[in-house]
Image (cartoon, rainbow, N blue to C red):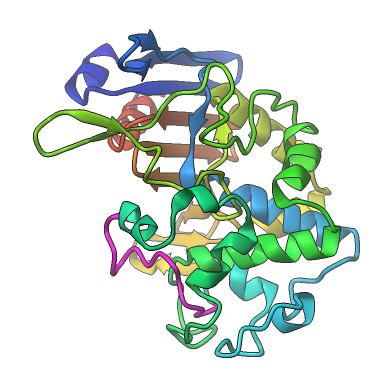
């Protein structure tokens, strides 16, 4: 583990558990200028690793009879989207098959930081703040055509949660998911109001120097990503989810069921809120979570047969995947 961390100059924390065996540790700096070390209990931004929270929140509202997966977008929001297909449902949004315009299309734009030149990031602190970036755009694909990763779809889901639950999205997740799961170190923190033990995200420039990502991301995380957590809190999330403490057994199965092929040749599928790898019998081998932002890199797997979980958080842009694969080989 030390050799792999040194080779990839890993900065972050990791946690793995199988049965009673636990492997955990940290490396690098949470604050480079002050030489403050990362710790296992350091809070890290996990980018799109938060999308599963949005999916769980939707499932909670479905379970409470306030929504259905067939509910149409046009019937669940008062906001007008004149160029969106009227038949888009929550199912389409959850599975990245809605075809709506993606405000950050990762196939067309490689640098998330470029978005904030025309949309100042310090104004983006809630789902509605994203509306000017996609509300009047045309569809980029037809609904149900194929899987195409889409951040706008999850912003729309967050708006639906706020409209139906009549409360702030972040407050809903923090109360109904984080607190229930005992994730007391997790939250949708604002970049200009970070709590203690929170790692700053770092971006390396071509000359080898480093800068923080404070001007590269929205000021506050939203339904498509940006919450902060610790590696141990993410383990608590999986324990609560698979123990049916957040949703009923039936609804948990709905959340984690394979829905749409991502890379059929590799047996990678997407469900409601996450990737999964299937075996030849189309059974889930492992659930896969990932997130990538400037200055943030997150990788996680959960093996349902053994209850094994591996979580790697980094406050740089590389290294989490390599470390996760090393831990997988050890286990």
Q: Quadrant of the C terminus?
A: top left
Residue 234: x %, y % from top left = 59, 31
Q: Which residue is pictured at 24% across the width and 21% down the height?
A: 4
Q: How many marks?
A: 0
| Along the viewing direction, whichever of 222 and 12 lies nearer the viewer | 222
User: Could you tell whether 181 is left or right of 322 in the image?
Assistant: right
Q: Which residue lies most toward the left here?
A: 207
Does 103 appear in magenta? Answer: yes
User: Quarter holding the N terminus?
Assistant: top left
Magenta span has 6?
no
Q: Is residue 200 above or below residue 45?
A: above
Residue nearest the viewer, comparing 254 with 280 = 254
- Can residue 258 be seen from the camera position used here? no
| Magenta stretch: helix, strand or loop mostly | loop
- Which one is nearer the viewer's eye here, 45 or 90? 45
Q: Is residue 257 left or right of residue 231?
A: right
Give me the residue at 56% from left, 44% from top.
220
Residue 23 lies left or right of residue 167; in this view the side is: left
User: Residue 305 lies in what quarter of the image?
Assistant: top right
Q: Position of residue 241 (x, y in %)?
A: 71, 40
Is 23 situated above or below 263? above
Residue, x 57% and y 86% (percent of image)? Answer: 84
Q: Is residue 109 left or right of residue 282?
A: left
Whether residue 204 is visible here, answered yes or no, is yes
- Image x and y of residue 27, in percent: 34, 15
Q: Position of residue 104 (x, y in %)?
A: 40, 64
Magenta extent: 98-111
User: Which image quadrant for residue 330?
Assistant: top left
User: Please, is residue 253 above or below residue 139 in the view?
Assistant: above
Determine the residue positioned at 41% across, 27% down.
200
């Amino acid at each position: 583990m030390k050799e792999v961390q040194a080779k990839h100059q890993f900065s972050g924390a990791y946690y793995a558990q199988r049965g009673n065996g636990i492997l955990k540790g940290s490396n690098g700096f949470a604050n480079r200028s002050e030489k403050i070390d990362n710790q296992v209990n350091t809070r890290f931004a996990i980018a799109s690793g938060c999308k599963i929270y949005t999916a769980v929140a939707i499932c909670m509202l479905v379970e409470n009879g306030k929504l259905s997966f067939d509910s149409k977008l046009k019937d669940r929001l008062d906001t007008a989207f004149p160029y969106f297909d009227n038949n888009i449902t929550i199912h389409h949004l959850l599975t990245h098959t809605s075809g709506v315009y993606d405000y950050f299309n990762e196939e067309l734009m490689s640098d998330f930081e470029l978005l904030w030149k025309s949309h100042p990031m310090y104004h983006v602190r809630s789902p509605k703040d994203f509306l000017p970036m996609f509300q009047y755009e045309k569809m980029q694909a037809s609904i149900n055509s194929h899987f195409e990763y889409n951040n706008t779809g999850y912003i729309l889901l967050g708006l639906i949660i706020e409209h139906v639950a009549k409360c702030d999205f972040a407050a809903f997740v923090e109360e109904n998911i984080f607190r229930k799961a005992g994730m007391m170190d997790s939250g949708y923190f604002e970049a200009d109001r970070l709590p203690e033990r929170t790692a700053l995200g770092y971006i390396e420039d071509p000359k080898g120097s480093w800068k923080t990502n404070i001007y590269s991301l929205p000021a506050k995380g939203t339904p498509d990503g940006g919450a902060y957590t610790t590696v141990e809190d993410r383990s608590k999330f999986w324990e609560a989810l698979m123990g049916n403490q957040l949703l009923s057994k039936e609804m948990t199965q709905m959340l984690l069921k394979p829905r749409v092929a991502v890379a059929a040749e590799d047996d990678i599928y997407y469900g409601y809120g996450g990737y999964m790898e299937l075996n030849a019998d189309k059974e889930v081998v492992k659930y896969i979570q990932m997130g990538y932002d400037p200055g943030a890199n997150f990788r996680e797997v959960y093996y349902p047969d053994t209850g094994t979980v591996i979580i790697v958080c980094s406050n740089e842009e590389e290294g989490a995947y390599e470390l996760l694969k090393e831990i997988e080989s050890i286990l």
